[in-house]
Image (cartoon, rainbow, N blue to C red):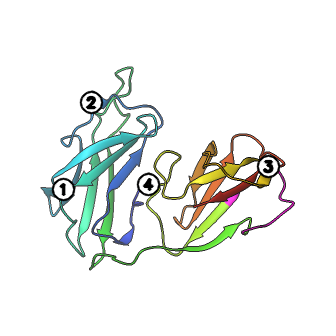
Amino acid sequence: MNPPDGAFGVHVSSSVSVTLNKAIDPASITTENFRLSAADTNLAGTISLSGGNTIATFNPDALLPPTTQITVHVDQTVRDLSGNGLIESFTSTFTTGSTLDNVRPFVVSVNPVANQTAVPVNTEITIVFSEPMDPTTLHATTTPVQFYTCIWNVFCPGYQPVVGAYSLSADGLTLTLTPAAPWSPTARTGSR
């Protein structure tokens, strides 16, 4: 669940995502059975699916009301690809902040550090951000952070995306890339 249950000071421009343990039947999820409400009034928005249809994201049509408790409802009528509904309905709440956050996050640190040599071929890359990141924006196909590899460490003819698993720490500050295969011993790897 993002934002987490009980979160306080959530950006009014936030989307809300729920991760399920199975792929969702896209035809079974609507703004009727996955909805946000404030003071018992449903908020308008659209739903998108990602992560092999295991992540449902509610994208509000407008900014969320400031300093307001938002309730997230996911009903049992949301179904998996076999037609099974949720075991039980899900409800979560969070409270929005008072203003829109217009300050862009920045990278605090990267490990391994720039131009580091003799890095083990099984090393994970970690990036620490200045503020919590939205996990729905950090994955291999759409992440603003792109990992790349240049072979032979001499000339980089273009970025070659690194295949691997992305994970975001519980506090939303640290992004980790675990490569699917060991790095090439002669590769120059980085992020942008």
* Residue 113 x/y as whole percent: 73, 69
For badge 3, the amino acid type reads Trp
Of labels 4 and 3, the one closer to you: 3
Q: Residues within 10 Å of mark 2 (few under 14, many from 20)?
A: some
Q: Are marks 4 and 3 in contact (CB under 8 Å)?
A: no
Q: Earlier in the sequence, mark 1 or mark 2?
A: 2
Of labels 4 and 2, the one closer to you: 4
For badge 4, the amino acid type reads Thr
The number of numbered discs placed on residues in the rendered structure image is 4
Of labels 1 and 3, the one closer to you: 3
For badge 2, the amino acid type reads Ser
Q: Residues within 10 Å of mark 1 (few under 14, many from 20)?
A: few
2 and 149: which one is in front? 149
* Residue 54 x/y as whole percent: 43, 37
Label 4, secondary structure: give it. Answer: helix
Q: What residue did someone put label 2 on?
A: 28
Q: Earlier in the sequence, mark 4 or mark 1?
A: 1
68 and 117: which one is in front? 117
Q: What residue did someone put label 4 on?
A: 137
Q: Is residue 118 above or below residue 51?
A: below
Q: What residue did someone put label 1 on?
A: 61
Reply yes or no: does residue 119 show up in magenta: yes
Q: Dividing the picture into quarters, in which one does residue 4 lie?
A: bottom left
